[in-house]
Image (tube, coloured by chain):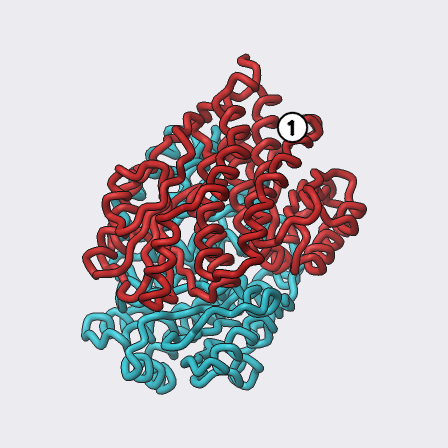
Chain colours: A red, B cyan
Amino acid sequence: MKPIEETHLYREIHQQPALIRELVSVPQEPIKALAKQIKDRGIKHVFIAARGTSDNAGRYAKYLLGAHNRMVVSLAAPSLFTIYRQPPELTNTLVLGISQSGKSPDIVSVLKEGQNQGALTAAITNYPESDLGKAANIVLDLQAGQELSLAATKTYTSQLTTLAILSAALDDEAQTQEDLKMLPDKIDLIFENEAAIDDLAERYRYMTHCVTIGRGFNYASAFEFSLKLKELTYTIAEPYSSADFLHGPVALMDRGFPAFVIAPEGKMNAEMKMMVEKVQNRLAEVILISNQPDLLKMVDHSIRLPAGIPEWLSPILAILPAQMFAMYLAHTRGFDVDNPRGLNKVTETW
Amino acid sequence: MKPIEETHLYREIHQQPALIRELVSVPQEPIKALAKQIKDRGIKHVFIAARGTSDNAGRYAKYLLGAHNRMVVSLAAPSLFTIYRQPPELTNTLVLGISQSGKSPDIVSVLKEGQNQGALTAAITNYPESDLGKAANIVLDLQAGQELSLAATKTYTSQLTTLAILSAALDDEAQTQEDLKMLPDKIDLIFENEAAIDDLAERYRYMTHCVTIGRGFNYASAFEFSLKLKELTYTIAEPYSSADFLHGPVALMDRGFPAFVIAPEGKMNAEMKMMVEKVQNRLAEVILISNQPDLLKMVDHSIRLPAGIPEWLSPILAILPAQMFAMYLAHTRGFDVDNPRGLNKVTETW
């Protein structure tokens, strides 16, 4: 088997610090232009079309643009456009397509409908010249370079960072700009944990199923962690918000059931603590990704995040150890991390 | 163990034909009043707050109000209201709370915020006098009688039926009224299959995990079936749209992996057929809930739905055999179907 360092996935995971540093350091004129259009038109609704990993970036946008910019974000049901052919009315709405390749036909069709209705359309993509890019009034280029691994990593964090810069451009506050500037240094700190993450993955060599749990801003992280575990390691991994999890599915947990909990410091602290307690009462095994000392001391297995991360940016950081964990787990299982079975790079769904 | 016929769950599942017949036969004045308000105010956005089973009713609303009424439906992130305290701007939006009990504090807080902002608020609940009912301009009473089983069944189909009547009142077309009238007779036909469903459940006595798949209108059905399997039988059951499933998670499937596919006749026919083929190529086991002869002859295990169901009403019918399946599976496993472990009737999430 190829050494992990020689895989595309490993290289792309390790390109993330430099890519994010570039995104937050260099002025992103198209993002500013989009923010200006949103403000000038008084747009308060965002309609996002995306699939797979990009849909998880949409989940982040829902919380971020909601909490920081008071926008109502709706995740599109693309089949309303492509199969039922009954698109909703999108006037005075930002129609935002998020797609690494810019090629998914159902995502493109949502943007085209937005254009036909005269809505403001924007695309977040790694390929500005793609069909999606062409259907957008404003294209936000991820500038992530070609992603050769089938599992998306660097394009996901570039999508989140792009959304974070957009939110900051909309709210125009000095603090959010400061927050963005410190992001790259925090990312570097996360990679110092890599050997420990590799070690931890060994323990889960024979894990067949698990849940991933996050809430608020990190609801998206639970979904993206789950997707990486499914794509790369073929583990049955179901994502939950802690609120939904406690309402029913907690009944699934029995002794040793693995629950990956993503809980960086923030307003969800008390709630996540209560949730960890309830899960542990069922004798389940909690694996925590966090920087909260009170939470960390409750569990035996954890990946420590650096201190002092603003909650709204935490999903960009918290997903990095999750990506590495999934990669090392796949590798220790002897799987080809660059070409997982059953995956295509472009989602050809209609 | 108590005979299944003496459980609340069995009784409540069997109350559904009469309850739905009543809902569609008797003029529902509050629904008409709500439709009038939506039209008079020119409202095109719906913001739905719900948890658990009620959230699945919200998923149905997203497709239904989208496809039939061209409304943009956003499923709320209640934590934006309760924990981050940054509610979005809801003016000119219908804020709709769906809750069996009407007591979930986070759902109530979304409606209160809607009221404070001067939005039109409505509640779909079994308890019009609840806090949720009090926070609503218009209350749509489910009229389902007390639900004593912890797992929701009759309140779910009453919620769907209420939403269907609302959609029909908004579009004002003779055909949708006709469709609604034939619903009760179709429901009676489904219960003729009950013994076969009981037999089928036996086969899955030792199933530990599965996926449930639906798309379009029946995306909600996949979620609700999954939730019943989790709540009642403690099976790890993850819901998917066929589009998302084929984009990655299909890689999980190996020989015998159970995939419950809900595919009543409709515009998704070709797509569901392709999906069943792909799943069967992986030697997985498809259990089909459908009335499409071409799909049914592809599989060895199925629950047959009556012919001639309008697609937009099919989620009300397709969930009934799924509820029965989960009940009989729980019973054959020796579980208490009325008091599943880890469940409370009221979701006390903040």
Name the one closer to the observer, A162 or B203.
A162
Q: Is residue B160 above or below residue B138?
A: above
Q: Is residue A209 above or below residue B10?
A: above
Q: Is residue A187 left or right of residue B35?
A: right
Name the one closer to the observer, A240 or B297.
A240
Residue at which label 1 appears: A206
Percent position of residue B188, x then y: 36, 66
Q: Secondary structure at mark 1?
A: loop
The residue marked by circle 1 belongs to what chain?
A
Please tell me which residue is depicted at 52% across the width and 36% down the height of the picture.
Answer: A228
Please tell me which residue is depicted at 48% across the width and 62% down the height of the picture.
Answer: A171
Name which quarter of the figure residue B93 lies in: bottom left
Please tell me which residue is depicted at 41% across the width and 25% down the height of the picture.
Answer: A148
Name which quarter of the figure residue A44 lies in: bottom left
Q: Residue furthest right?
A: A297
Neighbours of disc 1 within 10 Å: few (<14), some (14-19), many (20+)? few
Q: Is residue B236 left or right of residue A74?
A: right
Q: Is residue B34 visible?
A: yes
Percent position of residue B46, x then y: 38, 70
Check the picture and name the quadrant holding the N terminus of chain A: top right
Percent position of residue A24, x then y: 49, 44
Q: Is residue B328 left or right of residue B309?
A: right
Q: Is residue A178 above or below residue B69?
A: above
Name the one closer to the observer, B263 or A168.
A168
Q: Amino acid at mark 1?
A: Tyr
Please tell me which residue is depicted at 59% across the width and 65% down the height of the picture.
Answer: B84
Percent position of residue B55, x then y: 48, 63
Q: Is residue B115 left or right of residue B232?
A: left
Q: How many marks?
A: 1
Name which quarter of the figure residue A303 lies in: top right
Q: Is residue B289 visible?
A: no
Check the picture and name the quadrant holding the C terminus of chain A: top left
